[in-house]
Image (cartoon, grey):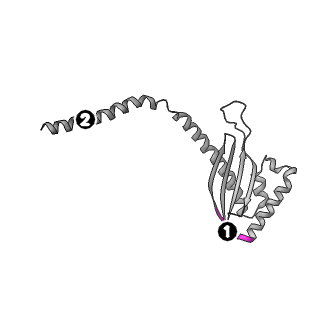
Amino acid sequence: MEQQYNQRYRNLLGIGAVLICFLLLLPALRFMPADAQSQSTSADISRDIELDDRVRAFFDSLQRENLSAAFEGLLVQSPLSSPAAMQQHTDLRNKVAEARNQFGEILNWEKYDTKPIGTDVVIVRYVLKYDQYPVIWTFMFYRKPSSSPGIPNPNRWVVVGLQFDPNLL
């Protein structure tokens, strides 16, 4: 009987020790930066929705074989739409038109990577799935930084880098 009492006493001591540790750590949990994380998550979600909408509109136009509208819509206010970048832009259009002939119709696409670089640069990668072959698209978006540190700039994201890569390996 005394042995059972000692066993129960040790079990209660163990439970008590766990409870005391929990109660001691509970006030420290209040100082975790949960509020800052939820704010950045909200901003990230908003940013991702905006960028996904831009890319979706681009791919929708490509799927309808309207290259001019696709590139014009994507490159609004972008330095890639300047006359200096026009040759690069033309080469890319030609590669996209050639891909259609080579790989068939565009079936669908999916995002597979989003990589923020700081608060004002984001690299987003998509797989564009043609009838016969997938192609990787990489978009680099930039927005002018805010003049107030810590406050995001409401300016629109612009494309500053665009890559079309049929070579998956």
Residue identified by numbered label 2: 12
At label 2, the amino acid type is: Leu
- Displayed quadrant of residue 29: top left
| Label 1 neighbour load within 10 Å: few <14, some 14-19, many 20+ | some
Residue at disc 1, secondary structure: loop
- Look at 31% across and 33% down and name the residue there: 17
**34 up-or-down from 130: above or below:** above
Which residue position holds label 1?
Answer: 133
Disc number for residue 52:
none
Residue 35: x %, y % from top left: 53, 34
In the rendered view, does 149 fall on the left or right side of 4?
right
Q: Residues within 10 Å of mark 2 (few under 14, many from 20)?
A: few
Residue in the image at 82% along x and 56% along y: 89
Residues shaded magenta: 102-108
Magenta-colored stretch includes residue 23: no
Q: Is residue 33 left or right of residue 162?
A: left
Residue drawn at x 81%, y 50% is 80
Residue 28 percent across, percent down from the top left: 45, 29
